[in-house]
Image (cartoon, helix red, strand yellow):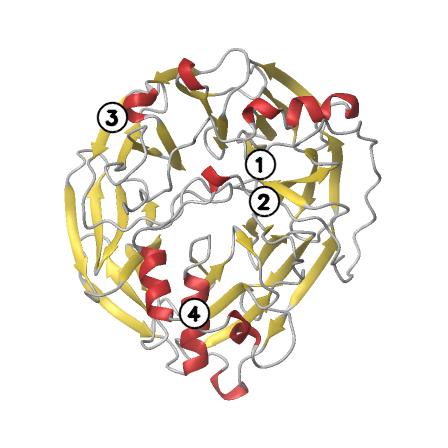
Amino acid sequence: MSQPPPHGYPPQPGDRSQQPSAPLPPLAPPTLPSPVISAPDPAAAPVRRPVWRKPAVLGLVLALVLGAGGWALWSFLGDGGQGHKKPAAAAKDAPGTVAWKAGARTKPDDKGMKEAPGTWFTSSLVVKAEPDMVTAYDVRTGEKKWSFLLADPLCAASRESEDNVAVVAIRIGGACARMLAVDLRDGHRIWDELIVDDKDAAEALIPEKWKNARLEIALHDGHAYAIWGTGGQTRRLKDGKRVEDEKWDACEMVDTAGGDLLIAITYCGDKGTTIRSLDPEKLDKPRWSRKIEEKQDGILSVVSTSPLVITQSPGKAGPDARDDFVVLDPANGNDRTRVPYNSYWRLGFCFLPTSGCTGAVVDKNSLYVAGKGVTMAYDLATGKERWTYKADAGRVTLPVSVRDGEVAAYTPATAERRGRVTYVSAASGKALRTVEHSDREADRKNEAMMAKVQGYPRLRNDRLLLIDDGEYEDAGSGMIFAINAPSAD
């Protein structure tokens, strides 16, 4: 049996396995409750990510699964109860020890997976969206600062936040039909709006012929942009007022990313793939638009918008599908530099609505890529390799941050071997110092489990945060696992 490509198989337009069997009833605009700290509703309906959004991972995940063995997920909460967990007082701030952990606060039901995209940061908080709630934790201590229930299941979230505001969408009557903006500092809702009129939601947002084109959200220049199978719209971030709408014939998949640019991608079958840079106030007049032939380089993922870096893979399934990194000119979308596929690379999840690609980090001048036993650096101006940092030959090592001339390279734990973060010179690739993680069996296993979920590690406020940005199906699954990772001795 052939292995799947690193980011999962390309979309299969003929797959109708997840289509709704009958038209949805008209949607009545519900009123969401005021933000309160409360227990989640265990009866909430699950939300399944379409098949093309559940990529199989050749390197990172496979290696960690094999390393972790068959231990039970409940071990994440083995010391009793759900939610925030405090480490032993004696090890509170010791480098490499577990600082805190938070379990999933929503219990799954017999219908399987639930979605949990959405992670954002303020200066002191990490804010996590779960299937039916949003919760903020202190990055350093894990103390819960605020939490509120969602009236219906979460179905989409912005990758980014802007001015301490993030946007999520919830599912109403089967359609991902309502967006709300949240102030990340205190959890209050800034606005709460239906995306389209309730009578049009079923037809517009989950049409049978393009089921994979789920709603995606991006933030850019004071606006929230939502895109789906037949169109998109922008709203002002400060008050939710609708600014612009766009419509097109059915597209099979869509994606978007915000930040310094607003990028939209549409996969429209025989009409090909189009990548656009949008003006949120003039959606019908993109800053530039570029068509890409599906059969050549049709599957894209936006790694960064500053600089603009994407992955491109051949538009076919199977072991021959490989991903290059491509730097695009932000002014016109033309190729500037291409970093060709390297067999050492071990990229993880791409196409995540709240992140770029696991295993790839970009700064102003360089691209850093995870590999088996290595982390590799490339010059974004030339596409040439700058250096290779050699780590543990048997494990993947991921770049997780670049700061003050140093790259933090993370080697996840397995059930038998502790993890570690090594700080590497961004100029030379030379290892400067290493923080070894806890060697307690439970800590190793918990770290190994959290390192293989959909999501990617973040290094914030001297905490290495392993966060689930995808799906979970077990009551004992973890949402956040925080490790003390001081940047200096």
Q: Where residue 238 sits in the image (x, y, percent)? A: 69, 33
Q: Amino acid at mark 1?
A: Gln
Q: Give the vertical position of 155 relative to 466 (above or below).
A: above
- Nearer to us of marks 1 and 3 is 1
| Residue closest to the eye, 448 or 146 | 448
**What amino acid is at disc 3?**
Arg
What percent of the width, then of the height, locates residue 489?
A: 33, 74
Closer to the observer: label 4 or label 1?
Answer: 1
Q: What residue is disc 1 on? A: 18
Determine whether label 2 and label 1 are within 8 Å by CB: yes
Q: Amino acid at mark 2?
A: Arg
What residue is rendered at 18% in x and 44% in y? Answer: 342
Front one among 433 and 53: 53
SS under mark 1? loop
Q: Which residue is mark 4?
A: 447
**Which one is in front in this view, the residue at disc 2 or the one at disc 3?**
2
N-terminal of the pair, mark 2 or mark 1, is 1
Q: Disc 2 to disc 3, how far (Cα)?
A: 37 Å
Q: Spatial distance from mark 1 to mark 3, Cα to Cα?
A: 39 Å
Residue 313 appearing in the image: yes
| In front: label 3 or label 4 | 4
Separation of marks 2 and 4 at Cα, in angstroms: 25 Å
Q: Which residue is mark 3?
A: 336
For the residues marked 3 and 4, what is the alpha-carbon distance in whole angstroms? 38 Å
Q: Earlier in the sequence, mark 4 or mark 1?
A: 1
Q: Secondary structure at mark 3?
A: strand
- In this view, the residue in front, 404 or 75, is 75
